[in-house]
Image (tube, helix red, strand yellow):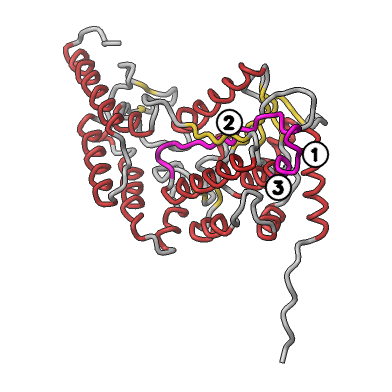
Amino acid sequence: MSGPRPTPRIDPALVTKVEAISADILDEYLQSHSYPWIIGFSGGKDSTLVAHLVFGVLSSLAPNDRRREVHLVSNDTLVESPLVISHIANVQEEIRSAADAWRLPVKVVTTRPDDDATFWVNLIGRGYPPPNRSFRWCTDRMKIQPTSRYIREQASVSGEAILLIGVRRSESATRAATVARYDNGERLHPHNDLQNCLVFRPIVELTTDEVWEYLAFNPPPWGGSHNALFKLYLDAGAAECPTVMSQADSASCGTSSSRFGCWTCTVVEKDRSLAGFVEAGFAEFEPLVAFRDWLAGIRDVPARRMARRRNGRLTVTADGVFVPGPFTLDTRREILDKVLAVQDKMSERLISDGEIARIKAIWAEDAIQMAAWASGSTVVA
């Protein structure tokens, strides 16, 4: 008979490594200035570890030393994978409740796209074709702009803001190159797009295995466990779409790797994460998978696209290739009908009444413009 199995233990070298990271976080937090911290929180493993370590440092400080505000900022594109956005909301509530109970200066925030910049308003209203690698119109409007606006607001109040992000050098060759580009020998470096914003990358030297190992052996300081996070990845067979704060980072959103993010994402050839949720037993998401695949399939069907772009021009590349314009009004109406049908089938809100009203207003404007083109009149602005 074999004896009892040894109790798993976290690697002591990793403990030492993370203790050094926490000491670095503490030292930066106790600097004399009062610039607020903003944690880009995607709900994935890396941003969860950053939040975990920062929260632990804050809770270890005496109340008088908790002088600097920490903003935990998530982004909801309004078309997030339902399980992912539910997970983020649950963690946000746990952090908010614990921060309130312990009187920590933590503010939990969710940014969202403007009413006129949502996925459905652009896709169904303006007829933008589904995003692909060469026309990724979604990232800037739905992710970068809302969160950048929030950071600028905080920086304008305090003079500067510090953005904490969970990027790691070992994520990929592309990420390593991006990290190296901004290495300046200092703990903080200026953000490449946002003025008065400094970037702090506390876990940049950790490996993926080290992140998972630390989370597995250390429950979150706000209470509970990280079990839901582990299950989310296990069910999806995926990685998270990370916090995206600039166009230079946007390639990480919608890559060929299996990531969870927007359920409507057509940048990837196949959404393995959403399919993974279905295979894991969440059959209620099958209509989302079917709709997403249908949407990707109609993108380049000539009969569904208008000849003119939205500015009224016909576009031909230098190589003589004709570039079609937005979806026809008939196709936009068909897409809306299908979204509403999926919404009814799932009994879950996918598109808001406000979005539908804005979509129909754009359709009315476009109908007038198309009539002007047909009559040879001046194009309506």
Q: Position of residue 133 (x, y in %)?
A: 48, 37
Judged by depth in the image, the label closer to the viewer, 2 or 3, is 2
* C-alpha distance separating marks 1 and 3: 20 Å
**At 40% from the left edge and 40% from the top edge, which residue is drawn?**
79
- Mark 1 is on which residue type? Asp
Which residue occupies the foreground of this view, 120 or 344?
344
Which quadrant is the N terminus positioned in? bottom right
* Residue matched to label 2: 245
- Mark 2 is on which residue type? Met
Residue bounds of the magenta highlight: 56-80
Label whose residue precedes the other's in the sequence (1 or 2): 1
Q: Position of residue 296 (x, y in %)?
A: 36, 43
Answer whether labels 1 and 2 touch (C-beta < 8 Å): no
Q: What number is the disc on residue 170?
A: 3
**At 45% from the left edge and 58% from the top edge, which residue is drawn?**
276
Label whose residue precedes the other's in the sequence (1 or 3): 1
Answer whether labels 1 and 3 touch (C-beta < 8 Å): no
Residue 57 lies in the magenta-colored region: yes
Picture quadrant of residue 34: top right
Q: What number is the disc on residue 57?
A: none
* C-alpha distance separating marks 2 and 3: 19 Å
Residue 27 lies in the magenta-colored region: no
**At 25% from the left edge and 33% from the top edge, which residue is drawn?**
332
**Crowd band around label 1 with a 10 angstrom C-alpha radius: few (<14), some (14–19), many (20+):** few
- Mark 3 is on which residue type? Ser
Locate residue 1 relative to residue 256 in the image: left or right. Answer: right
Question: Height in image: 229 above or below 267?
Answer: below
**Crowd band around label 3 with a 10 angstrom C-alpha radius: few (<14), some (14–19), many (20+):** some
Label whose residue precedes the other's in the sequence (2 or 3): 3
Judged by depth in the image, the label closer to the viewer, 1 or 2, is 1
* C-alpha distance separating marks 1 and 2: 23 Å
Picture quadrant of residue 102: top right
